[in-house]
Amino acid sequence: MRIGMIATLGIMGLAAGGLWMLESQHAHRPKKQHVDVTNDGVAELREQLGSLQRRLALDEESTVALSRSVERETVLPATQASKSESDQPKTPSAPPTIEQQTQLFKAHFSNLDVLRGTVPDRALEAKVRDVFRRGGEGDVGRLNEAKIDVVACGNQFCRVEVVLPDSGSVRLAQSQVQIQLATVANQMTIFSEPGSTRLLAYVATGQRQLPDFPRLDNEPVGG
Amino acid sequence: MKRTRFIVGGLLCVGFIATVGMPADATTNSNQTGAACQELFDQTSPTATHIEHDPVAVYHQDTLSHKYVTCPMTRRNTLTTTGLSGGNVYINDTSPSGTDFKCGMNSYDLFGNLVSGTGWVTSFSRHNISLPGITSTSSGYYAIACDMPAAPTSTTGPFLWSYDWYEN
């Protein structure tokens, strides 16, 4: 839309400029005139000079006016376009607080609980538990200190809760849990509440996708 | 006067060409050398060979075990929630199967919670891993994680040249 408007204005401006150039070139072409070099002739010449000076002044005035008009036509629509809905300069919103972010994760996990449903998938639960068993024995040894508290699966979604001995080890354990779950997950999300020793994870398996992460009201969607 | 007209006409032309020539796609492409990748956990042992770096790649020459690395991604648009539309990791997978090199892409919030992460994705040509898109949250950040397989011999280990991603 904006491109179309500017393109049309540009073409119109070029056409108008061209016509105007042709017209003024024609107007300024010197005409062959008979000049009477008598006293009366001098007066006539003075009159012609005055007339030419007036025309020249008008011409300059109209050039400036036209330039300003063109400038308005080219600048204003662009300015207006930049303030249109899609290009509104985004007011930088403040980063979310840890409390806000926790609320968003809780809402996200509530949505996922609904998607998981109430019919348990025991085979998938066993597969997830097995992943942790094998991982715990391998190179992600810190999980040996963790307790896999909850593995609840249904509709190809699994909720996993891991309890750590202290809150300080939660973030490091998160990466390890993530590495283990990545072997069965198509997508996943993991969070913990501030100060908590419990990691909460959700994985989508098979062809399942996680729903969109909830947004704060003042968060812009796209860039 | 003529000069003014030419300037006005020229400005109109430049404005027209510049506007029409603007890309309609708002996706932003970024890339990074594999040398930015770091070992994910401290897996130090007296016999283990560490991850090695040079300006063009990160290398893994340990024949005993695989190694996890994490690779940072600089986020350009920190306010949006549309995340990444995808990415690629350019590698040399020297494992016997050619499919043991795995990577995943993750987005975190400001406080380190995982907003969205992919499962492991394996290479399909020994040289490229194509990663799917992920969502994000305002002010968070992104990272790629890779599992580099053990080297067949001490001089033929896998390596990671570079990686790229497309920010929505």
Image (cartoon, coloured by chain):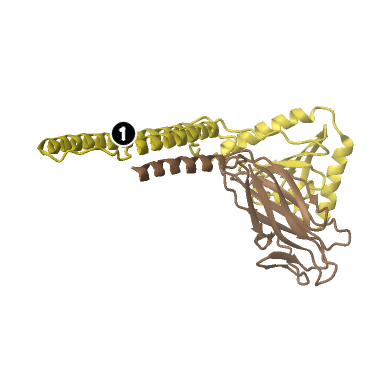
- Label 1 environment density (alpha carbons within 10 Å; few <14, some 14–19, many ≥20): few
Horizontal and vertical percent position of residue B135 = 67, 40
Position of residue B97 relative to residue A87, above or below, is below
Position of residue B36 relative to residue A162, above or below, is below
Pointer 1 indicates a residue of which chain? A
Residue at the spot x=32%, y=38% of the render?
A: A28
Q: Is residue B81 left or right of residue B161?
A: left
Position of residue A1 relative to residue A97, above or below, is above
Q: How many marks?
A: 1
Of A55 and B104, nearer the camera is A55
Of A69 and A22, nearer the camera is A22
Q: Residue B63, located in which quarter of the rendered image?
A: bottom right
Q: Which chain is brown?
A: B
Of A52 and B148, nearer the camera is A52
Residue at the spot x=75%, y=41% of the render?
A: A187
Horizontal and vertical percent position of residue B90 = 74, 57
Residue at the spot x=48%, y=44% of the render?
A: B14
Q: Quadrant of the N terminus of chain B?
A: top left
From where the camera sits, is residue A156 visible? yes
Kind of element beneath mark 1: helix
Q: Which chain is yellow?
A: A
From where the camera sits, is residue A82 visible? no
Of A187 and A48, nearer the camera is A48
Q: Is residue A13 left or right of residue A116?
A: left
Horizontal and vertical percent position of residue A193 = 63, 40
Residue at label 1? A62
**Label 1 sits on what residue type?**
Ser
Q: Residue B9, located in which quarter of the rendered image?
A: top left
